[in-house]
Image (cartoon, helix red, strand yellow):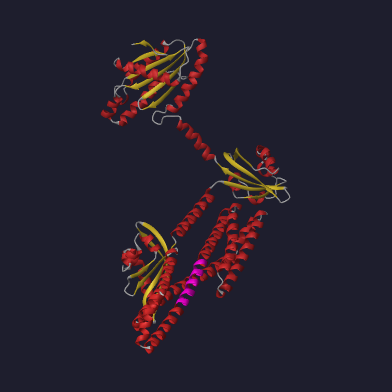
Amino acid sequence: MRSSAEPIHRTSLGRGVGLLMVALVAMGLIIALLAGRARATLDDLRRADRINNVLPTMTMLMEDLLNAETGQRGYLLTQRSSYLQPYRDAVRNLDRRVEELGARDQDPAHAPKLARVRELVNLKLGEMNQTIRLHDSGRQDEALELVLNDQGLHHMDELRDVLGELTSSLRAERAAISERLSREAGHTELLMLAGLAMLGLFTVMATSQVVLRSRELLRTQKRLQGIADNVPALISHYDADGLLRFANAEVGRVFHADPAALRGSTLEQVRGTENAAQMRPFVERVMRGEAVSFDAEQVIDGETMHFHQRFVPELVNGRVEGFYACSMDITDRKRTEALVAASERRMKAVTDNLPVFITYIDAERRMRYVNEALRTWFGLDPQAAIGLHIDDVFGQASTSQRSAQLDLALSGERVEFEIASVMLGKQRHLRTVYVPDVVADGRVQGIFTLSIDITVMKQAEAQLARLASSDALTGLPNRREFDQALAAALSRQRRLAREGRVMALLFLDIDRFKAINDTHGHGVGDIVLREFAAVLRRAVRGSDHVARIAGDEFVAVLEGLNRPEEAEQVAAKIVDAVRAARPAEVAITTSIGIATVADVEAPAMDLIALADRALYQAKHQGRDGWAALRWPGQDQRR
């Protein structure tokens, strides 16, 4: 740099000391002005860095505030101590966040508000500790009253307002810094151009200064761009004609476009016609010089998103030359709020409709608290039961059912059990939990009880068990029930074989059943299946097991036969009865495969396969009949 500057310096001196002095003075003035602006820019950047350091802490503080309110609401809805833990953690986080905020925000102007925030958090922390003490001591009503008192709600509202004011103040200051930096950058460029025009004879020295200052400005612009691109918000600038002049990386991410390619676009082109229409009234206000804030729901690529918008006018000499837009994506917060609201509605609906019976019984087994379920379930006045012994309330017969569980709970053990009791002439199945109330010195001073009516569930379980083992169309046992019955029959056959008894498996189907469905329709087909099942049920003994395993396929397990021929007699009886049935005036026949087993142990699947093979033989022989095979596969008939 020095070697190139010196020849020009000597040339300039040769042209005249006066001209050189004028050039040097002009350069000195320009350098002084540029240095002053650079220092101011550096100060603004440092301030912007501090604001960006403070704002995330303040945002987390607001999130912890929301968590504290959610914990309060959870406790208000459920009165369960488990909801106090999120409340406690959130309030403690508030206290820690306030300390972090105080350490990061050293602005003296914010000190009074930060002090008020710390004071309010300490008040909420005291309130939370008192709430937990009241709840843990069994004074839930007082704990709820404390959570609901106007003073506590006022503190929470004031805390939210103060934090909102601080956040708005910092964001406004950051926007002002961005505006000032943009304006100062433009002025600096003008000064450089003026300096170059004035210092034509001093080109090399001026150029060196311009390069130095340009590099500094470039670093400043990159720093500003870096700040804007890393802020979790959509930052953009529109000129007086409504054209986009700047957009940060978040704008490109949300709208799936290169921010540079968006420059020169209108609001409609960037956000879409419908989304822009929502924002137009606010654009008109900001172009009149008014800073506006609002929430907007925007549909972007088919996805609904929520934004908190802030429009700030760009004022140049008192005239609006455009506006700055800062949009915070609050979609996750809105979704969380919707989930919390939905959860609260569901929780309220559940707690309002569950048949729950709640009591508190002291160590002397006297009632100290009981809810309205006592009236519904037992027909007794809850208030009249307070102070009475449980034997006098429920009767000794009822309490003796639970005597062992009561003893365990009063000894300090949590107990959960199911029991059936008769209440007002109606039997209820209850799932009951006993929770011991243990004080600090280890004594059990009582127990909390919670009983849920599970009668409907028990009835449903019984009904499902019945449905799971039967065929819906014919009412016969299904394949699952048949597999169990066959396994049990084979197990019994091992004992009966010693007495010379025989077991048979009949595999039946309806001849040409598909043709019946195709000709007469599936409605007639269902009638045929039901009548066939009825004929089959009548044709065998009551002790024999009959089942429908699929479509028109049926089976029958015959146990305790004296000889294999008895199974063939049953098959012949079934064939004749089916031929005579004529359900829905349709002539039907059946083919039957018989597998018999005597003194040889047969696996279930192999015996089914043998009966299936026998059925195939009966079909091959012309249908409307039967064929029999003896385990392990000897042909016995036809």
- Relative to 75, 479 lies left or right: left
Q: Farthest residue toward the left?
A: 519
> Hey, which residue is sitting farthest bottom in the picture?
18
Residue 631 magenta-drawn? no
Q: Is residue 284 rendered to the left or right of residue 440? A: left
Q: Disc count in the image? A: 0
Residue 62: x and y in percent read: 53, 63
Residue 47 magenta-highlighted? yes
Q: Quadrant of residue 134?
A: bottom right
Vertical comparison of 562 with 452: above or below: above
Q: Which residues are magenta?
A: 38-53
- Residue 304 appears at what percent x and percent y? 38, 58
The answer to whether residue 610 is seen in the rendering is yes
Quadrant for residue 614, please give it: top left
Could you say which is closer to the camera, residue 565 or residue 6? 6
**As displayed, is residue 218 above or below residue 535?**
below
Q: Is residue 443 left or right of residue 21?
A: right
438 to 455, vertically: above or below? below
Q: From the viewer's perspective, is residue 417 above or below residue 58? A: above
Principal secondary structure, stretch drawn in magenta? helix
- Residue drawn 33% across the image and 18% down it: 616
Q: Is 312 positioned to the left or the right of 79 in the image?
A: left
